[in-house]
Amino acid sequence: LEENGVEGSSIYIYGEGWNFGEVANNARGINATQLNIAGTGIGVFNDRLRDAVRGGNPFGDRLEQGLSNGQYVASNGLDPESSSLDDVLLQMDQVRVSLAGNLMTFNFVDRNGNSIDGTQVAYGSDPAAYTLDPQENIIYVDKHDNETLYDNNVYKAPEGTDMDTRVRMQILGLSYTMYAQGVPFFQAGTDMLRSKSMDRNSYNSGDWFNRLDWTYQTNNFGVGLPPAGDNSAEWPTMQPFLADESLQAGEDAITATTMRFQDMLRVRYSTPLFRLRTGEEINARLAFHNTGVDQMPGVIVMSISDVVGEDLDTNYDMIAVVFNGQPDTLEFTADSLAGMAWELHPVLVEGHDDLLATASADGDTGMFTVPAYSAAVFVVPQS
């Protein structure tokens, strides 16, 4: 330290953590892949939440829907095989685990009514959970590889979805990252409805497809078919979308998105309860509602308590986040959250989403009312 001015124990190490190629399955020794990471403190990318929120996966059918763009509750009618009730309920369990730091030790009631831990939720042939500490969980819904979140939703949202709703879907998708336990990761421009005109691998596509317009006049959608490379097989599917001028976001939509994104940033950093430091704290404080066999599809309700253990937040005793992925206003009652003085987070009351500002809670009954395609944060002020 005296010689180099660097304290290694204070450096955060992270990477993608994919299990593939010549080092797959520890072929050349144990390496820092997802399933080896628990307890190391090394952060790796969480594709579980990414796929459940976006729909499908980077190598599958681009029309498969996810929690941010209407799966099951607002089907696009293009991929019925992946739009069953059980499919969306499994995705919701995967997201719950991810919101809870992707902890192997986190317990909750799954879609079948069983009390399980994070390792018992499936993600393909692997367990969904693989961490023991939230800093090992890097949460994201879009990054440099694959389509941007906006382009992803162009493929997957129901036909005729208007721009206002697309803005709501964008912010809803980003809210799963913003309000999760772990390390949030956002692609540059995702708060500006960034488009690469559906380019799924733009590392060598130049400024034409990678452009960011800081004046907010355009999100760069519809500037042409992306380079052949990894895109030509999808050109016939892309063409009608790219020719549709109604999908080109303008200043009003871009400004609304970036301001609402900033509201969410303020909410996250208004309380340490969104940034719990250990797996033990998450297990003790975080809970889910709307679980089990009779749950409402597309709706995730999470609470974080400050009335157990150390007083971490001098402002709030409890926080609840209601993620409403349904196309209509939601009314949801959680008996376990009744009898508390719930109110909408003050940042959202004074924020840049007039519709979200109408979200409300009945503290006596524990009923929450939340607009379509919205994530509302409610708080119980500390007495």
Image: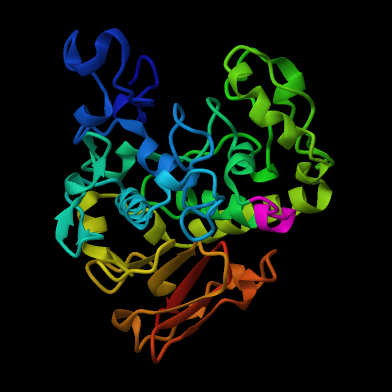
- Horizontally, residue 105 falls left or right of residue 289, namely left
Residue 322, magenta (yes or no): no
360 is higher (above) or lower (below) than 82: below
* Any part of residue 379 in sight: yes
- Horizontally, residue 235 falls left or right of residue 254, namely left
268 is higher (above) or lower (below) than 156: below
Q: So how many labels did they put on this image?
A: 0
* Any part of residue 198 in sight: no
Residue 349: quarter of image: bottom right
Check the image and tell me how it is coloured: rainbow
Seen at 53% across and 72% down, the residue is: 345
Seen at 78% across and 41% down, the residue is: 248
Front position in the image: 158 or 144 = 158
- Horizontally, residue 40 falls left or right of residue 204, namely left
Seen at 57% across and 44% down, the residue is: 156
Task: Name the spot of residue 147 as percent of width and height, x first.
Answer: 58, 31
Task: Name the spot of residue 288 as percent of width and height, x first.
Answer: 30, 65
Residue 160, magenta (yes or no): yes
Seen at 35% across and 68% down, the residue is: 303
Quadrant in which the C terminus is drawn: bottom left
Task: Name the spot of residue 290 as percent of width and height, x first.
Answer: 33, 70
- Horizontally, residue 300 falls left or right of residue 161, namely left
Question: Magenta stretch?
Answer: 159-166
Quadrant in which the N terminus is drawn: top left
Task: Name the spot of residue 202 as percent of width and height, x first.
Answer: 62, 20
Front position in the image: 68 or 180 = 68
380 is higher (above) or lower (below) than 112: below
